Amino acid sequence: MEIQLRSWLEVLVDIWPCDYEGAWTLANPFRRKGIALHSGEVSEAHIFPSEVAGFHISWIDQEEKPVALNTAQIRNTPLCTTLDFENKSLSTVEHLLSALVGCGLTHVHIKVSGNEIPILDGSAKCWVDAIQEVGLKPAITPSEKASILKKSILLNRGDSVISAIPAKKLKLIGVIDFPYQAIGQQMYAIELCPNNFVKEIAPARTFGFIDQIDQLKKAGLIKGGGLENALVCDGSTWLNPPLRFKDEPVRHKLLDLIGDLALVGLPKAQVLVYKGSHSLHADLAAALLEHCSTD
């Protein structure tokens, strides 16, 4: 797996923007179809270039006007982020949004079937592959300027903590601590730009624990989960090695964070998260909306 991943990185065309300052859309549309992690149903996502700044959503075979995505739509559900609309919802959006914003895209129209984004391989790599296949091009309208954090933020939910302090560039620091020998304590820091996202964050897969599977299934979750779309930990070992990175779990936590911040924009800040969750990420997104400006 490590050799395959290295080969994937080596053949990447240098199509990515150098930072998050510009306005970019897709050169051509693409689509992906697959199993949804929690519902277990087959779902499809068609991703189109857009002339309008931001990320917009509509449903396949429906004539409704696309809806602009924003933080007010975020509803956190166990193990994923869900967006609520007037008469429908869309779950497990974080990996797709992470890929879009992480690669530097700012103008995108998403059309979906059903109520959940397909999980694919459990990372953002398949979305990044698709973006690379069709390419990027400059958008014809400007994007919103990068958000500049004006004051420090410190938030917590129980013993989970997230902080953001003003900085010239976006730096992410993730820390996790699990009572499983295969994971334990991990820390990873990265100065984020599209190239670094593609190489160091996008391939990191979601993960779970074998001793929690029955409980989650009884709760109606992970109906589409399997060894092909998630790392599964059995205490001191992994059921489906090898890992793509020795610290793949903490990198995936940062992947989720990036996706959960996509609707507020990636800020110029240093963000540290300890035992992060989608709920805690949403708290930070709301605080950034209040304490950031584009001046």
Image: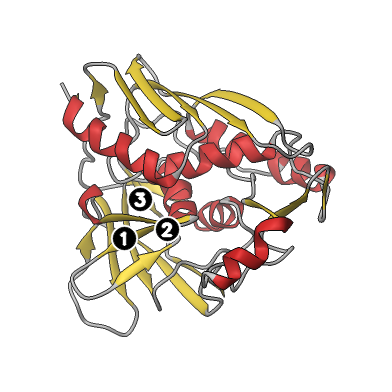
Q: Quadrant of the C terminus?
A: top left
Q: How is the image coloured?
A: secondary structure
Determine whether 227 is above or below 252 in the image.
Answer: below
* Among the 4 quarters of the image, the one containing residue 184: top right
Horizontally, residue 233 falls left or right of residue 201, namely right
Q: Position of residue 25 (x, y in %)?
A: 35, 50
Residue at 77%, 40% in the rendered image: 6
Q: Which residue is mark 1?
A: 83
Q: Earlier in the sequence, mark 1 or mark 3?
A: 3
Q: Which residue is mark 3?
A: 25
Q: Position of residue 216 (x, y in %)?
A: 58, 64
Q: Pointers 2 and 1 in contact (CB under 8 A)?
A: yes
Badge 1: few (under 14), some or many (20 or more) residues near its Cα, within 10 Å? many
For mark 3, give the secondary structure. strand
**Mark-to-mark CA distance, 1 and 3:** 22 Å
Residue at 35%, 70% in the rendered image: 111
For mark 1, give the secondary structure. strand
Residue at 21%, 82% in the rendered image: 63
For mark 2, give the secondary structure. loop
- Give the amino acid at mark 1: Leu
- Give the amino acid at mark 2: Val
**Mark-to-mark CA distance, 2 and 3:** 19 Å
Q: Which residue is mark 2?
A: 93
Horizontally, residue 217 falls left or right of residue 106, namely right
290 and 79: which is toward the camera: 79
